[in-house]
Amino acid sequence: MSFAIACADPQALDSGTAPEAIDQLWWPAVSLQRARQVMRLNGTVTNDRLLEALQNAAYSVNDELQAWSEAQRQAHPDGLPKGRLTNLYLRAVHFYAKAELVERYRDFDATGAGDRRADDHEGIPDEARRNMRWAISDILGKPRATVEAL
């Protein structure tokens, strides 16, 4: 006699201690819930993992924009003004985090079905990084692509 039990997707335990947002001194706060919606994440990504990915993303984007932000801090000491620049900053952080999460979850399921699903998502990290680079270029006012004649 055999039977099967339907179970939801396996989920890692979540500590329940992840904050609702990553507060930064000058940069805009990064909301975990908003990031989850924007990145269209399913329930397999715990808040702890999402928090780690968003923190790493914010650190990297902040580092890339350090020289630019120092000039902006003099003009806007209370923080990055709401609007276009804030949206572009959050876009860069969200897409950096998405690239990291997709790559980290790719190796989670080593079955044949998992490999096929991973192949379906193969280009997602590259596209996410491209979108992150474009957002940073837009913030800096630089062209999105550099073309050289050979």
Image (cartoon, rainbow, N blue to C red):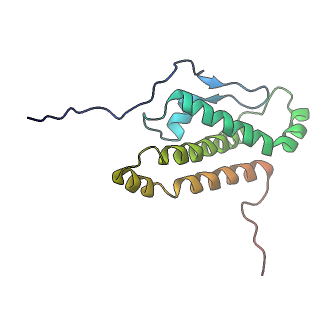
Dividing the picture into quarters, in which one does residue 86 lie? top right
Which quarter of the rendering shows the C terminus? bottom right
Which residue occupies the extreme top position in the image? 17
Residue at 49% from the left image edge and 23% from the top image edge: 14
- Percent of width and height locating residue 62: 77, 39
Residue at 38% from the left image edge and 50% from the top image edge: 114
- Percent of width and height locating residue 12: 45, 29
The answer to whether 144 is drawn above or below residue 105 in the figure is below
Q: How many marks?
A: 0
Using residue 2 as the reference point, say whether residue 101 is left or right of it.
Answer: right
Judge by depth and name the residue closer to the eye, 115 or 88: 115
Which residue occupies the extreme bottom position in the image? 150
Residue at 52% from the left image edge and 58% from the top image edge: 123
Judge by depth and name the residue closer to the eye, 89 or 76: 89
Using residue 121 as the reference point, say whether residue 70 is left or right of it.
Answer: right
Residue at 34% from the left image edge and 52% from the top image edge: 113
Dividing the picture into quarters, in which one does residue 94 lie? top right
Which residue occupies the extreme left position in the image? 1
